[in-house]
Image (cartoon, rainbow, N blue to C red):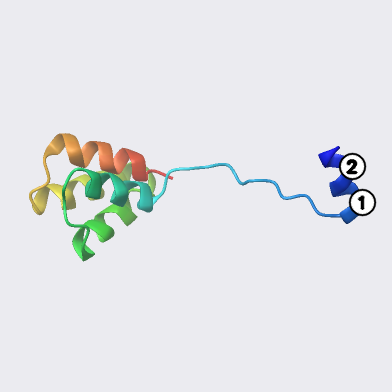
C-alpha cells in the first residue's frame, strides 16, 4: 500500500546508511564528561582519515589529558 502511494506520487525517500564520523567521536567525548572544544573537534576530525588519522586523533586527545581508553573509543567511533 505504501509503495503504491509512493509510485503514484513519484516520491520515495530512502534513508542513508548510518556511518561513524567525527560527530560520533565528539558525542562520545561529551558523554564521558569532556568539554568538546576546538582541540577535541580537531582530534575527532582526524579519526576519519584511516589508520594514520586514528593515530593522530589518539595522540591529540592524549595531549589534552584524555584517558587512553576514552581516546581509543572516541577515535574508533570517529572512523569513517
Figure quadrant of residue 77: top left
Task: Give me the disc on residue 65.
Answer: none
Local SS, label 1: helix
- Tell me the residue at 81%/54% (across/down): 11
Marks 2,1: beta carbons within 8 A: yes
| Front position in the image: 31 or 19 | 31
Residue furthest bottom as drawn: 38
Figure quadrant of residue 55: top left
Residue 53 shows up from this direction = no
User: Where residue 5 appears, x then y in whole percent?
Assistant: 87, 46
User: Where residue 68 appears, x then y in whole percent?
Assistant: 13, 37
> What's the CA distance linking mark 2 and mark 1?
6 Å
78 vs 17, left or right, is left
Residue 61 shows up from this direction = yes
- Tell me the residue at 44%/45% (across/down): 80
Residue furthest top as drawn: 69
- Tell me the residue at 20%/42% (across/down): 71
Mark 1, Cα crowd under 10 Å, few <14 / some 14-19 / many 20+, is few
Task: Give me the disc on residue 4.
Answer: 2
| Front position in the image: 36 or 49 | 36
Residue furthest right as drawn: 8
Residue at the spot of label 1: 8
User: Where residue 2 appears, x then y in whole percent?
Assistant: 82, 40
Quarter of the figure that contains the N terminus = top right
User: Where residue 40 appears, x then y in whole percent?
Assistant: 22, 57
Local SS, label 2: helix
Amino acid at each position: 500500500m505504501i509503495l503504491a502511494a509512493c509510485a503514484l506520487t513519484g516520491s520515495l525517500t530512502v534513508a542513508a546508511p548510518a556511518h561513524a564520523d567525527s560527530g560520533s567521536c565528539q558525542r562520545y567525548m561529551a558523554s564521558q564528561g569532556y568539554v568538546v572544544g576546538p582541540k577535541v573537534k580537531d582530534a575527532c576530525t582526524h579519526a576519519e582519515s584511516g589508520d594514520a588519522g586514528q593515530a593522530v586523533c589518539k595522540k591529540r586527545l592524549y595531549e589534552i589529558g584524555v584517558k587512553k581508553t576514552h581516546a581509543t573509543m572516541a577515535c574508533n567511533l570517529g572512523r569513517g
